[in-house]
Image (cartoon, helix red, strand yellow):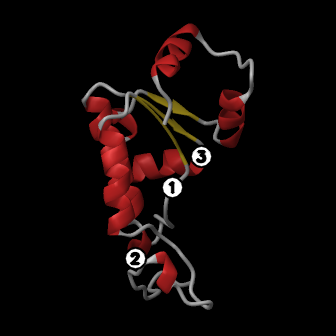
Amino acid sequence: IGYDAGFRICDLDDIEADEMILDIGPKTSKMLAEYLKDAKTIIWNGPVGVFEMDNFKEGTRDLAEKVAEATANGAFTIVGGGDTIAAAKAFKVADKVSYISTGGGASLNSLKARHCLLSQPFRKELSNSLF
């Protein structure tokens, strides 16, 4: 896939066998925004598109901006994993979230463990809600 790759926006049911999903579309972006606007805790792990390519960055940019917006509105936000951190930096929201963690998948595995060890501030924030 080249940096000038073409694209089209369509519903999941309309994707052809020879096509790839390289970003979320505006409907999915709007749905995520609805979930995020009332969230008390957000754990963001992974870009939602190939954000390094101009044609496929909008979904990740929208998500990054919504996570930063939620933080400004009082949500506790964690950005985890190298690609997610790179996206947060690319869209200039890395300094607008509560916490950056270099652990991506490993952090998620810790959170879903039955008896995970969390620092007291995380334990308090995460007990409120998880997204």
x and y percent of residue 79 in the render?
Answer: 49, 38
**Which residue is drawn at the image coordinates 40% and 53% (left, top)?**
90
Tell me if mark 2 has few (under 14), some (14-19) or many (20+) residues whose alpha carbon lies within 10 angstroms of its own.
some
Question: In this picture, is 31 found above or below 55?
Answer: above
x and y percent of residue 125 in the render?
Answer: 47, 18
Amino acid carrying label 1: it is Pro
What is the secondary structure assignment of the residue under circle 2? helix
Q: In front here: 65 or 24?
A: 24
Amino acid carrying label 2: it is Asn
Give the residue furthest to the front: 13
**Which residue is drawn at the image coordinates 56% and 14% (left, top)?**
123
Q: In front here: 105 or 83?
A: 105
Asked if marks 1 and 3 touch (Cβ < 8 Å), the reply is no
Which mark sits nearer the N-terminus, 1 or 3? 1
What is the secondary structure assignment of the residue under circle 1? loop
Label 3, on which residue? 82
The Cα–Cα distance between marks 1 and 3, rounded to whole angstroms, is 10 Å
Label 2, on which residue? 55
- What number is the disc on residue 47? 1
Which mark sits nearer the N-terminus, 1 or 2? 1
Asked if marks 1 and 2 touch (Cβ < 8 Å), the reply is no
Tell me if mark 3 has few (under 14), some (14-19) or many (20+) residues whose alpha carbon lies within 10 angstroms of its own.
some
The Cα–Cα distance between marks 1 and 2, rounded to whole angstroms, is 14 Å
**Which residue is drawn at the image coordinates 46% and 69% (left, top)?**
23
